[in-house]
Amino acid sequence: MSIAHTMAATTATASAQDSGRRGGPCRHPDPMTALSGPAARTAPTLTVLSAGVGVSVQDLGRPGFAHLGVPASGPADRRSFTLANRLVGNPENTPALEVTLGDLTVTTTVSRHVAITGAPVPVTVDGVRRPDPTLVHLRAGSRLTIGRPWAGCRTYLAVSGGIQTDRVLGSASRDSLTGLGSEAVRAGTTLGLGPARPVPAIPLELAFSIVPTAGEVTARFRWGPRHDLFSAADRRRLATQTWRVSAACDRVGARLTGRPLAVGSVDLASEGTVRGAIQVPPAGEPIIFLADHPVTGGYPVIGVVTDADTDLIGQALPGQELRLVPVP
Protein backbone atom coordinates (compact mmCIF):
# COMPACT_ATOMS: atom_id res chain seq x y z
CA MET A 1 0.00 0.00 0.00
CA SER A 2 1.43 3.37 -0.98
CA ILE A 3 2.08 6.16 1.49
CA ALA A 4 -0.58 8.20 -0.27
CA HIS A 5 -3.15 5.46 0.37
CA THR A 6 -1.91 5.19 3.95
CA MET A 7 -2.52 8.89 4.49
CA ALA A 8 -6.09 8.57 3.19
CA ALA A 9 -7.02 5.24 4.75
CA THR A 10 -8.62 4.59 8.12
CA THR A 11 -7.44 1.75 10.28
CA ALA A 12 -9.45 -1.39 9.48
CA THR A 13 -10.13 -4.25 11.87
CA ALA A 14 -8.39 -7.34 10.51
CA SER A 15 -9.19 -10.93 11.36
CA ALA A 16 -6.57 -12.69 13.46
CA GLN A 17 -4.27 -15.03 11.60
CA ASP A 18 -2.51 -18.03 13.01
CA SER A 19 1.01 -17.63 11.70
CA GLY A 20 1.89 -20.99 13.17
CA ARG A 21 -0.17 -22.66 10.42
CA ARG A 22 2.20 -21.29 7.81
CA GLY A 23 4.99 -23.60 8.73
CA GLY A 24 7.52 -25.05 6.34
CA PRO A 25 11.20 -25.67 5.90
CA CYS A 26 12.01 -21.94 5.62
CA ARG A 27 9.98 -20.80 8.65
CA HIS A 28 11.63 -21.12 12.04
CA PRO A 29 9.16 -20.77 14.92
CA ASP A 30 10.41 -18.75 17.82
CA PRO A 31 10.81 -20.84 20.99
CA MET A 32 8.51 -18.43 22.79
CA THR A 33 5.59 -19.42 20.58
CA ALA A 34 5.90 -23.02 21.73
CA LEU A 35 5.46 -22.25 25.41
CA SER A 36 2.40 -23.52 27.21
CA GLY A 37 1.00 -23.48 30.73
CA PRO A 38 2.48 -21.08 33.34
CA ALA A 39 5.52 -20.31 31.16
CA ALA A 40 3.28 -18.92 28.39
CA ARG A 41 1.41 -16.72 30.86
CA THR A 42 4.63 -15.16 32.17
CA ALA A 43 6.45 -14.70 28.86
CA PRO A 44 7.01 -10.95 28.28
CA THR A 45 4.99 -9.49 25.43
CA LEU A 46 4.23 -6.26 23.61
CA THR A 47 0.61 -5.73 22.56
CA VAL A 48 -0.50 -3.31 19.85
CA LEU A 49 -3.61 -1.48 21.06
CA SER A 50 -4.08 0.61 17.93
CA ALA A 51 -2.17 0.94 14.67
CA GLY A 52 -2.26 2.72 11.36
CA VAL A 53 -1.96 0.62 8.24
CA GLY A 54 1.80 1.09 7.85
CA VAL A 55 3.34 -0.85 10.78
CA SER A 56 5.62 -3.83 10.24
CA VAL A 57 8.28 -5.91 11.97
CA GLN A 58 11.72 -5.40 10.40
CA ASP A 59 15.26 -6.52 10.98
CA LEU A 60 18.17 -5.92 8.59
CA GLY A 61 16.54 -8.15 6.00
CA ARG A 62 17.37 -11.25 3.98
CA PRO A 63 20.12 -10.33 1.49
CA GLY A 64 21.48 -12.99 -0.85
CA PHE A 65 18.25 -14.24 -2.46
CA ALA A 66 17.94 -11.83 -5.40
CA HIS A 67 18.63 -14.72 -7.79
CA LEU A 68 15.35 -16.23 -6.55
CA GLY A 69 13.49 -12.95 -7.00
CA VAL A 70 13.27 -12.43 -3.21
CA PRO A 71 13.82 -8.81 -2.09
CA ALA A 72 16.22 -8.12 0.76
CA SER A 73 13.57 -6.04 2.61
CA GLY A 74 14.62 -4.62 5.99
CA PRO A 75 14.04 -1.05 7.23
CA ALA A 76 13.56 1.74 4.69
CA ASP A 77 15.81 3.95 6.86
CA ARG A 78 18.52 1.62 8.13
CA ARG A 79 20.52 4.25 9.99
CA SER A 80 17.58 5.20 12.21
CA PHE A 81 16.67 1.52 12.70
CA THR A 82 20.13 0.45 13.87
CA LEU A 83 20.41 3.50 16.13
CA ALA A 84 17.15 2.55 17.89
CA ASN A 85 18.52 -0.92 18.62
CA ARG A 86 21.86 0.40 19.86
CA LEU A 87 20.15 2.81 22.25
CA VAL A 88 18.35 -0.04 24.04
CA GLY A 89 21.37 -2.37 24.05
CA ASN A 90 20.22 -4.69 21.24
CA PRO A 91 22.38 -6.02 18.41
CA GLU A 92 21.73 -3.97 15.28
CA ASN A 93 19.86 -6.81 13.52
CA THR A 94 17.29 -7.26 16.31
CA PRO A 95 13.65 -7.14 15.08
CA ALA A 96 11.87 -3.86 15.82
CA LEU A 97 8.83 -1.97 14.52
CA GLU A 98 8.81 0.31 11.47
CA VAL A 99 5.92 2.78 11.75
CA THR A 100 4.82 4.66 8.62
CA LEU A 101 3.06 7.97 9.29
CA GLY A 102 2.67 7.27 13.00
CA ASP A 103 -0.57 6.35 14.77
CA LEU A 104 0.61 3.51 17.01
CA THR A 105 -0.24 2.68 20.63
CA VAL A 106 1.46 -0.21 22.45
CA THR A 107 1.75 -1.63 25.93
CA THR A 108 4.08 -4.21 27.47
CA THR A 109 3.61 -6.79 30.21
CA VAL A 110 7.05 -5.96 31.65
CA SER A 111 8.97 -2.75 32.26
CA ARG A 112 11.40 -2.09 29.40
CA HIS A 113 13.45 0.67 27.82
CA VAL A 114 12.24 1.62 24.35
CA ALA A 115 13.90 3.85 21.76
CA ILE A 116 12.12 5.94 19.12
CA THR A 117 14.12 7.22 16.15
CA GLY A 118 13.63 8.26 12.52
CA ALA A 119 10.85 10.65 11.56
CA PRO A 120 10.25 12.96 14.56
CA VAL A 121 6.88 12.33 16.20
CA PRO A 122 4.95 13.39 19.29
CA VAL A 123 5.12 10.64 21.93
CA THR A 124 2.93 10.24 25.00
CA VAL A 125 3.03 7.73 27.86
CA ASP A 126 -0.35 7.28 29.54
CA GLY A 127 -1.45 10.52 27.92
CA VAL A 128 1.51 12.59 29.15
CA ARG A 129 3.73 14.14 26.46
CA ARG A 130 7.40 13.15 26.55
CA PRO A 131 9.56 16.13 25.55
CA ASP A 132 12.49 13.89 24.51
CA PRO A 133 11.16 10.47 23.48
CA THR A 134 14.41 9.10 22.01
CA LEU A 135 14.88 6.78 25.01
CA VAL A 136 11.94 6.03 27.32
CA HIS A 137 11.60 3.68 30.29
CA LEU A 138 8.14 2.18 29.78
CA ARG A 139 6.60 0.64 32.89
CA ALA A 140 4.59 -2.57 32.64
CA GLY A 141 1.01 -1.81 31.62
CA SER A 142 1.70 1.77 30.53
CA ARG A 143 0.50 2.92 27.12
CA LEU A 144 2.98 4.46 24.71
CA THR A 145 1.48 6.37 21.77
CA ILE A 146 3.34 7.54 18.67
CA GLY A 147 1.60 10.36 16.79
CA ARG A 148 1.96 11.65 13.22
CA PRO A 149 5.46 12.82 12.19
CA TRP A 150 6.02 16.49 11.33
CA ALA A 151 8.86 15.61 8.89
CA GLY A 152 9.68 12.37 7.13
CA CYS A 153 7.39 9.37 7.21
CA ARG A 154 9.03 6.38 8.96
CA THR A 155 9.65 6.06 12.69
CA TYR A 156 11.31 3.12 14.47
CA LEU A 157 10.37 1.62 17.83
CA ALA A 158 12.93 -0.73 19.39
CA VAL A 159 12.40 -2.52 22.70
CA SER A 160 15.17 -3.77 24.96
CA GLY A 161 15.44 -7.51 24.27
CA GLY A 162 13.85 -7.14 20.85
CA ILE A 163 10.75 -8.61 19.26
CA GLN A 164 10.57 -12.40 19.04
CA THR A 165 8.80 -13.72 15.96
CA ASP A 166 9.07 -16.25 13.14
CA ARG A 167 11.88 -15.94 10.59
CA VAL A 168 11.67 -16.73 6.89
CA LEU A 169 14.95 -17.28 5.01
CA GLY A 170 16.72 -16.18 8.18
CA SER A 171 14.87 -12.87 8.61
CA ALA A 172 11.85 -11.56 10.51
CA SER A 173 11.38 -8.67 8.05
CA ARG A 174 7.93 -8.18 6.59
CA ASP A 175 8.19 -7.99 2.78
CA SER A 176 5.29 -5.95 1.42
CA LEU A 177 5.85 -7.20 -2.13
CA THR A 178 5.81 -10.98 -1.58
CA GLY A 179 4.24 -11.25 1.89
CA LEU A 180 7.26 -13.12 3.27
CA GLY A 181 8.24 -12.66 6.89
CA SER A 182 6.27 -11.60 9.93
CA GLU A 183 2.54 -11.03 9.73
CA ALA A 184 1.33 -7.46 9.24
CA VAL A 185 1.05 -5.59 12.54
CA ARG A 186 -2.50 -4.53 13.44
CA ALA A 187 -4.53 -3.59 16.48
CA GLY A 188 -4.62 -6.67 18.70
CA THR A 189 -1.26 -8.05 17.53
CA THR A 190 0.77 -9.49 20.41
CA LEU A 191 4.51 -9.98 19.98
CA GLY A 192 6.93 -11.81 22.24
CA LEU A 193 9.90 -9.98 23.73
CA GLY A 194 13.38 -11.36 24.33
CA PRO A 195 15.28 -11.05 27.63
CA ALA A 196 16.02 -7.44 28.61
CA ARG A 197 19.49 -6.13 27.84
CA PRO A 198 21.59 -3.55 29.70
CA VAL A 199 21.04 -0.09 28.23
CA PRO A 200 24.38 1.50 27.31
CA ALA A 201 25.25 4.82 28.90
CA ILE A 202 25.44 6.74 25.62
CA PRO A 203 24.75 10.48 25.87
CA LEU A 204 21.68 11.06 23.72
CA GLU A 205 23.28 14.13 22.16
CA LEU A 206 25.80 11.74 20.56
CA ALA A 207 23.05 9.61 19.04
CA PHE A 208 23.05 10.38 15.33
CA SER A 209 20.50 9.44 12.71
CA ILE A 210 19.04 11.02 9.62
CA VAL A 211 16.95 14.07 10.48
CA PRO A 212 14.18 14.03 7.85
CA THR A 213 13.42 17.33 6.19
CA ALA A 214 10.18 18.70 4.80
CA GLY A 215 12.18 20.62 2.18
CA GLU A 216 14.11 19.52 -0.88
CA VAL A 217 15.98 16.21 -0.64
CA THR A 218 19.36 15.81 -2.37
CA ALA A 219 20.49 12.27 -3.17
CA ARG A 220 23.79 11.28 -4.81
CA PHE A 221 23.91 8.60 -7.49
CA ARG A 222 26.30 6.79 -9.83
CA TRP A 223 25.62 6.17 -13.52
CA GLY A 224 24.91 2.69 -14.85
CA PRO A 225 24.53 -0.04 -15.70
CA ARG A 226 22.24 0.97 -18.63
CA HIS A 227 22.80 4.72 -18.87
CA ASP A 228 24.26 4.29 -22.35
CA LEU A 229 20.73 3.56 -23.63
CA PHE A 230 19.79 7.19 -22.94
CA SER A 231 20.76 10.29 -24.86
CA ALA A 232 23.11 12.90 -23.42
CA ALA A 233 20.14 15.25 -23.12
CA ASP A 234 18.19 12.73 -21.04
CA ARG A 235 21.16 12.03 -18.79
CA ARG A 236 21.56 15.77 -18.27
CA ARG A 237 17.83 16.09 -17.50
CA LEU A 238 17.99 13.36 -14.85
CA ALA A 239 20.84 15.15 -13.08
CA THR A 240 19.72 18.77 -13.40
CA GLN A 241 15.95 19.01 -13.09
CA THR A 242 14.09 19.11 -9.79
CA TRP A 243 11.95 15.99 -9.48
CA ARG A 244 8.97 15.55 -7.20
CA VAL A 245 8.08 12.40 -5.25
CA SER A 246 4.72 11.19 -6.54
CA ALA A 247 1.84 9.64 -4.62
CA ALA A 248 2.99 6.25 -5.95
CA CYS A 249 5.60 5.59 -3.28
CA ASP A 250 5.86 2.79 -0.75
CA ARG A 251 8.43 0.30 0.55
CA VAL A 252 8.91 -1.06 -2.99
CA GLY A 253 9.99 2.24 -4.51
CA ALA A 254 9.40 5.95 -5.03
CA ARG A 255 8.19 7.14 -8.43
CA LEU A 256 9.34 10.63 -9.41
CA THR A 257 7.37 13.12 -11.49
CA GLY A 258 8.86 15.69 -13.81
CA ARG A 259 9.70 16.07 -17.49
CA PRO A 260 10.02 12.39 -18.52
CA LEU A 261 13.05 10.75 -20.05
CA ALA A 262 12.85 9.18 -23.50
CA VAL A 263 13.38 5.46 -23.07
CA GLY A 264 12.45 4.40 -26.57
CA SER A 265 12.15 0.75 -27.49
CA VAL A 266 14.34 -1.50 -25.35
CA ASP A 267 14.55 -5.28 -25.25
CA LEU A 268 16.34 -6.30 -22.07
CA ALA A 269 16.22 -9.46 -20.04
CA SER A 270 14.91 -8.98 -16.52
CA GLU A 271 17.87 -8.33 -14.23
CA GLY A 272 18.51 -8.47 -10.53
CA THR A 273 19.41 -5.12 -9.04
CA VAL A 274 19.98 -3.32 -5.74
CA ARG A 275 18.27 -0.91 -3.41
CA GLY A 276 18.66 2.58 -4.81
CA ALA A 277 18.49 1.53 -8.49
CA ILE A 278 16.89 4.24 -10.65
CA GLN A 279 14.69 2.35 -13.07
CA VAL A 280 13.07 4.10 -16.04
CA PRO A 281 9.83 2.46 -17.27
CA PRO A 282 8.26 3.28 -20.67
CA ALA A 283 6.44 6.36 -19.30
CA GLY A 284 9.88 7.90 -18.67
CA GLU A 285 9.37 8.87 -15.02
CA PRO A 286 12.12 7.31 -12.87
CA ILE A 287 11.41 4.93 -9.99
CA ILE A 288 13.95 4.65 -7.17
CA PHE A 289 13.91 1.12 -5.78
CA LEU A 290 13.65 0.76 -2.00
CA ALA A 291 13.72 -2.12 0.50
CA ASP A 292 11.10 -4.41 -1.07
CA HIS A 293 12.05 -3.84 -4.72
CA PRO A 294 11.67 -6.55 -7.40
CA VAL A 295 13.89 -7.43 -10.36
CA THR A 296 13.91 -4.95 -13.25
CA GLY A 297 11.25 -6.59 -15.43
CA GLY A 298 13.28 -5.62 -18.49
CA TYR A 299 13.25 -1.85 -17.87
CA PRO A 300 16.65 -0.12 -17.92
CA VAL A 301 18.43 1.15 -14.80
CA ILE A 302 20.06 4.48 -15.61
CA GLY A 303 21.85 4.88 -12.29
CA VAL A 304 22.01 3.84 -8.64
CA VAL A 305 21.56 6.10 -5.62
CA THR A 306 24.47 5.76 -3.18
CA ASP A 307 23.76 3.26 -0.45
CA ALA A 308 23.79 5.87 2.32
CA ASP A 309 21.39 8.19 0.52
CA THR A 310 18.72 5.53 -0.05
CA ASP A 311 17.78 6.09 3.59
CA LEU A 312 16.90 9.68 2.63
CA ILE A 313 14.58 8.41 -0.11
CA GLY A 314 12.98 6.06 2.42
CA GLN A 315 11.90 9.11 4.45
CA ALA A 316 10.60 11.18 1.50
CA LEU A 317 6.92 12.10 1.37
CA PRO A 318 4.61 12.49 -1.65
CA GLY A 319 4.97 16.00 -3.05
CA GLN A 320 8.50 16.49 -1.71
CA GLU A 321 11.10 17.84 -4.14
CA LEU A 322 14.17 15.75 -4.89
CA ARG A 323 17.43 16.45 -6.71
CA LEU A 324 19.66 13.67 -8.06
CA VAL A 325 23.34 14.60 -8.07
CA PRO A 326 25.85 12.38 -9.92
CA VAL A 327 28.94 11.32 -8.00
CA PRO A 328 32.05 12.46 -9.93
Image (cartoon, grey):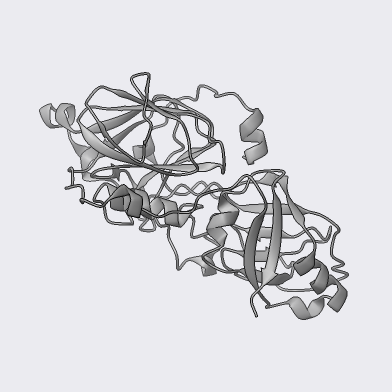
For residue 42, say whether it is visible.
yes
Considering the image in quadrants, where does the C terminus appear? bottom right
Q: Residue furthest front?
A: 205
As drawn, 219 above or below 23? below
Count of marks overlaid on the render: 0
As drawn, 281 above or below 28? below
As drawn, 324 above or below 128? below
Image-quadrant location for residue 182: top left
Q: Residue at x 75, y 74 (%)?
A: 268
Residue 44, how many percent across, how many down? 20, 33
Q: Residue at x 84, y 68 (%)?
A: 263
Q: Nearer the viewer, residue 228 or 43?
A: 228
Considering the image in quadrants, where does the N terminus appear? top right
Is residue 113 left or right of 263 when viewed as pictured? Answer: left
Residue 174, how many percent across, how many down? 46, 47
Q: Residue at x 66, y 59 (%)?
A: 288
Residue 64, how many percent across, how many down? 45, 68
Q: Residue at x 34, y 50 (%)?
A: 205
Residue 54, how many percent across, how many down? 53, 37
Q: Residue furthest left?
A: 38
For residue 296, say whether it is visible.
no
Is residue 44 left or right of 83 when viewed as pictured? Answer: left
Is residue 178 left or right of 320 when viewed as pictured? Answer: left
Q: Nearer the viewer, residue 19 or 81?
A: 81
Q: Nearer the viewer, residue 128 or 221?
A: 128
Q: Residue furthest top?
A: 127
